[in-house]
Structures are given as structure tokens and as C-alpha cells.
Amino acid sequence: MTRTTIVAAAFVLAASTAMAGEHFGRESIEKSGYQGPETCEECHPGTAKAFLDTVHWKHESKVTNVDGIDPKKPYGMKNRIYVMCNGNDIVNNLKEIPKSPETGKTKFSGCNTCHPGNHLSDVGSTGPEAEKAIDCLVCHSSDYDFSKRKPYKDEQGRIVMGQDRSTKAALAIGKPSVKNCMVCHEAAGGGYVVKRGFSFTKDTDVHAAKGMVCVDCHKAKHHKIPTGLDPNNWANDGVRISCADASCHGDKPHKDADLNRHIAKIACQTCHIPRTGGAFAKDFTVWTQTADKFYEPTTLKKEANETTPVYAWYNGTVANTPHFIGPKGSRKDGKSKIMPFKIFQGKAFYNAKSGELLSMDFAPPMASGDTRGGVESAARTLGLKNPEQVAKSAVPGWQTIYFGSNHLVTKGKALSCANCHAPNGVLNFKNLGYSDKEIVRLTTPELYLKQLVEKQKEEW
């Protein structure tokens, strides 16, 4: 009998006797230690190979709902250029940046530092070595030592992303915790709540207050993670999630029939996510020196729950131009719902001739503030003709991006009737396509007075 068969058989027995939450491979790990994915494969054969076909590993997928791109080609963090990041895994692969002229020190930087591999087998890699490089525990261990997950140079001078493959971490294996997910997703875009502008705690989200974790909603199948629709978030595993899924809230989540009628045109997020946060402006043409004498893009940011969203119709398709990325839809297309969005505006360099947004290699500006040097380096990496001239003639410009608001869910502070239907309500009915006559009808207390008075009596 092979070791794999023995462990598999042990699982059948352990499943009926082990304490809730105890991993059935514990005895094997205690005896033989943790050897990486091959240890996991003893009980989960084929999982490593399957994981290589997910967005978390590839950082790209085919995208069919965005204007101006080829639906037959993959897009994502690997190759996309937009002004939240102004770079990607190709031009900002994990590397050692030039030494600071002031301190003589250097550091590692790269957009793919959150990639769950060892960097030797990098974004999108395949084959046996890539399978061995997967960092299973960074997502699945509740006792992972994140101080070990940092880049270093090996004896051959190659840059390697470290991993915690200790027996201690492996013995704490289980369903991904909030920390496992948020260590990357909370820090995306260059720092804490910069990109998405949300934290997931009992104080900021009703789901967290109930003890839920990210994967309770984002339930993976073969490590393919379901996601919601977001004009900014292109790459996906082909699996979608919404509040109205049958396993969650359904299409009649309220006891009040009037509220349930709104669901046909109003997304759940509109009422239940009244605030957002994160960066609302970045300037990649001027970098600011930080305390360590390195440089970062000049950024304006607010904390979670500090920003009021803007509301627009969204049917799941995306307008995409060099100066605008945002929701498409209207009240008349039969598919759209009113949804909340965080507006972000970024300044970067554009090609003087084509008008296309240019990417930036962060190494030169991070070391010395030389932003055009970063454009030249990126142009050279991407194979553009005359990269020096491209950088020299580049012109600065702004791009506006609508980020979907899908977290920071509240029940107690959800919008009420008056928040939307009072004359000074949060919804701009004019911009949403309503006529003056309709607006008069939609902004009268006649719609909600009786209901709110009754609720007021209950509170007394």
C-alpha cells in the first residue's frame, strides 16, 4: 500500500472522529514535516496543477465585458496599464531597485510581491517546478509567519520570494482566514486601504461582525474564486457572486414588500454600502520622498468609511478609454441597476503621438524620483520603438476610474427612504436619466412619510 493510499484511508477514519476544525493530515505532517505542495497533494491530488489555471496564479484572464480590448486575449495585473498602478507584472516584476543616491541603500519592489509563488516560478508559469513553487500555506495557515514572506537573493544572485514552510505553519492548516486574504487585498495599490478602500472587521462590515470570513461569500471551487462585477476588476475565474444568490439573501431579502420592489432597479450595495474609502487621487508624474529617502507616487487617501460614493447605472459592461474606465448602462436597457462607486483619478504620462497611456517602471522613480526614466525603462521592456524619445515627449494627463463598492456592508446605517427620496437626497436623479416631472414625483414625502412615521413610533 502506498503512502498516499494510507493517508487517504486515514482521512476516512479521521473524518468521523477528529475534532471539528482539526486537519486530517496532521499526523502525517507531524511525522514527516511539510515539504510544500507535494505534502498537500498526498490528500489533494491534482490541486497544484489546477491552481496554476486560476487568476491568483496567472494574474490575467480573457475579458469579454470591457470596451476596446481583444476578447480573445487575456488581461489583468500581468499586463494591464491603468492609473491606479500605472504598471504591471511585466514592467514591475519583483526586483532590486537602484541604490538611493542619498543613502546608498536599495530595496526590493514589484507589483507581483503578492503572487503565491517563489518568483523563480513566476506569474503564469506552468509545469512541475511551478507546482512545487506554490505557497499553499500563505492562504491556508492561521499560524503563517509573514515575516518570512519577503524577497531575498539566493546564492546564484536570483531574487526569490521567501515562504513559511515550517511544520508549525502546516499544522495550522484550514479554511483561509480574513488575515490570509487581506494581507494582500487590503494592501493592494501601494499601501493599507489604498486601492479598494475597505477593511473587513466587526466594526466595518456586518458580515465580519457575524463571524464570517471572506471565503464564506467567495466560495472557491477548484481554487477558482467567485467575484462580483466591478468596472475596475477585469481578470476573473469565470465565476460570479452577488448578494441575491440563493445561498445568501435571495431576491426578496426584506420583510417589507416596498423595499423588495426596489431590487429590480437598485443594487443591494446602493443602500447597504453608503460609504467607502481609499486613495482618490495619485500623481505618477511627481513622486514624493518618504522618510527612508526613497520615493512613492504622490497620493491623496481617505480611510475606510470616509468617502461618499457616486451612483450610476451599471449593466456589467465597462467603458474603457485612455482617460476613463467606468460603468456602462442606463435605466432603459432592462439590465442595469443603480450602484455605488468610488471615483479615483490618476495622473500619468501619455504617448504624445497615439494618446495611449504609458506604463512606468517604478525602479528609477522609487530610487531617485526620475519619473520619465521610469517611462523610458518600461517602454524598453515592452519593446516600444525609440523608448528614450517616447519618454522625452510623453505628456501628462488624467484618467478617471470607477471602483465598485462591494464591501463595508452595514445594516444599521443603511440608507433609508428619505436618504434617497428627499429633495437633497444622495441620488442625483437628473444624472440618472429621470425627467423633471419624474424627479418631482420621486422627491416627495408622500412616498415615505407614513412608513417612516410608523417606524419612528416603534423606536419610541
Image (cartoon, rainbow, N blue to C red):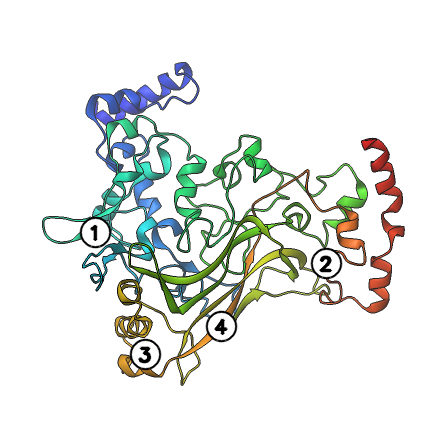
On residue 120, the disc is 1
Three-letter code for the amino acid on which mark 4 is drawn: Trp
Q: Nearer the viewer, residue 385 or 252?
A: 385
Q: Which residue is mark 2?
A: 427
297 versus 183 height, above or below: below
Measured Cα–Cα span from mark 1 to mark 3: 30 Å
Query: Which label's residue is closer to the chain start, 2 or 3?
Result: 3
Measured Cα–Cα span from mark 2 to mark 3: 42 Å
Query: Which label's residue is closer to the chain start, 1 or 3?
Result: 1
Where, quadrant-wise, is the N terminus in this rendering?
top left
- Disc number lying in front (1 or 3): 3
Q: Quadrant of residue 41?
A: top left
On residue 398, the disc is 4
The local secondary structure at tag 1 comes to: loop
On residue 391, the disc is 3
The local secondary structure at tag 2 comes to: loop
115 versus 424 height, above or below: above
Decide if residue 318 is in sight here.
no
Measured Cα–Cα span from mark 4 to mark 2: 26 Å
Three-letter code for the amino acid on which mark 1 is drawn: Leu
Query: Which label's residue is closer to the chain start, 4 or 2?
Result: 4
Quick one: which residue is furthest to the top in this view? Answer: 17
